[in-house]
Every structure is written in structure tokens, then in C-alpha cells.
Amino acid sequence: MRIHVQTSRTIQTVGSVMEIWPTGNYIEHMPKGTPQQRIGQHWQNTGNHLRKALKGYEKLSHEE
């Protein structure tokens, strides 16, 4: 019984490692640009979303 349990756990462990083992090149998924460029892009996107939200709010407030 103990051998069966140990073998089963070993097989499960190997399966878990195989699930997270990279199968390709992860460089393509890595962020591009310097940290300053990336945070600048995030703030630019935030500004775009805020402008879009404000325009929608203004449009709704003029319809009432």
C-alpha cells in the first residue's frame, strides 16, 4: 500500500511539472520596452479611458 501511494504521488508530481513546463519561447510574451515606457503607456491608456468615460457622462447628462 505504501509503495502504491508513493508511486501515485510521484506520478502526480511529474504531471504537475509537465503542466507548467514551457513548451515554447516565452520571450514573445514578455513586456516590450523599458519600465518607464510601459508605465507611461499605462497612464496614457488610463487617460484615454477617463476621457471616453467623461464624454459618455456628458452625453448622458445632456440627454436628460
Image (spheres, helix red, strand yellow):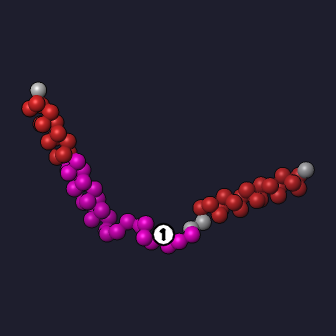
Q: Is residue 62 magenta?
A: no
From the viewer's perspective, tell me whether residue 56 is left or right of residue 21.
left
Q: Is residue 41 magenta?
A: yes
Q: Residue at x 43, y 66 (%)?
A: 29
Region in magenta: 23-49
Q: Determine whether the residue tagged by mark 1 lies in a helix, strand or loop.
A: helix
Total numbered badges shown on the rendered structure: 1
Q: Which residue is at 77% across, 59% downward?
A: 10
Residue 30 placed where, x, y %? 42, 67
Q: Specify whether 44 is left or right of 64.
A: right
Residue 41 on image: x %, y %: 26, 60
Residue type highlighted by circle 1: Tyr
Residue found farthest to the front: 63
What residue do we see at 23% from left, 48% from top? 49
- Residue 39: x percent and y percent? 29, 59
Asked which quadrant contains residue 58, the reply is: top left
Farthest-out residue, right: 1
* Residue that carries the numbered disc 1 in the rendered image: 26
Query: Residue shown at 65%/62% (left/top)?
Result: 17
Name, please, the residue furthest toward the left. 62
Looking at the image, residue 9 lies above or below residue 26:
above
Majority secondary structure of magenta residues: helix
In the drawing, does residue 24 fall left or right of residue 4? Answer: left
Callout 1: few (<14), some (14-19), or many (20+) C-alpha neighbours within 10 Å?
Answer: few
In this rendering, position of residue 31 left or right of residue 36: right
Q: Is residue 62 above or below residue 8?
A: above
Residue 2: x and y in percent read 89, 52
View extreme (top): residue: 64
